[in-house]
Amino acid sequence: MPQNGFSEDGYIIDQDYFAAYPYRGSTSNINGCGWVAAFDLLRARGRNIPFQEVLSGLNGTCPTKLPGPTPVRALRQYLAGFGNYRQCRRRRAALRAAEKASAGILRYWEGKEPHYIPFLRQEEGVYRFLNVADGMEDMSCPMDEFFSTHCRFGSVVVIVPRERS
């Protein structure tokens, strides 16, 4: 496990290493999963933007600086500057959209907390999930398996790029 929060291929896999970076009235180790997911998704889409720029840019779209999850609309507004993204809110629709995407962001409840994570397609039916939880910083499994083990309670939102057909 890298000692700086990054994977060997440059993705942020552990937000716990970013306590020195304020975000929305808290610190990024506690409240930074939204900007971390945006950074990783943009990286997967070929945008190598410094993480400080993503943090600052997304922080600027949030209407209030109170601790709490990044509003989905703020995340979509920020991502809109880099391409066309869509969201799916219902569990089945979200699962179908995620399974068709090359990369995306999943917002779900990890335990008692709303949480954003990026996912990247590795091969047919297998996805890489980053920054999930302690001990699951960089994991791979089928999308439906992730949904059945991690998205069991609460709302689910998937944000994926609109792929050109």
Image (cartoon, rainbow, N blue to C red):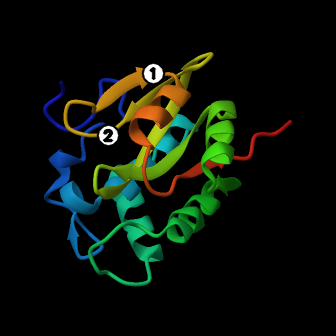
The residue where tag 1 is placed is: 141
Q: Residue at x 74, y 46 (%)?
A: 162
Q: Left or right of 12: which side holds 101? A: right
- The residue lying toward the viewer, choosing from 111 and 11, is 111
- From this view, report whether residue 59 is shown above or below residue 152: below
Q: Left or right of 118: which side holds 159? A: right
Q: Residue at x 20, y 59 (%)?
A: 30
Which quadrant is the C terminus positioned in?
top right
> Residue 144's quadrant in the figure?
top right
Label drawn at residue 73: none
Q: CA distance from mark 1 to mark 2?
A: 14 Å
How packed mark 2 is, by other alpha carbons closer than 10 Å (few <14, some 14-19, many 20 or more), is many
Q: Residue at x 63, y 61 (%)?
A: 80
State the image coordinates of residue 130 (x, y, percent, origin top left): 37, 35
Q: Left or right of 33: which side holds 98? A: right
Which quadrant is the N terminus positioned in?
top left
Q: Amino acid at mark 1?
A: Cys
Task: Say which of marks 1 and 2 sits in front.
Answer: 1
Q: Left or right of 148: which side holds 77? A: right
Q: Amino acid at mark 2?
A: Asn
State the image coordinates of residue 157 (x, y, percent, origin top left): 55, 54
Label drawn at residue 131: 2
Disc 2 element:
loop
Q: Are marks 1 and 2 in contact (CB under 8 Å)?
A: no
Disc 1 element:
strand
Residue lying farthest to the right in this orientation: 165
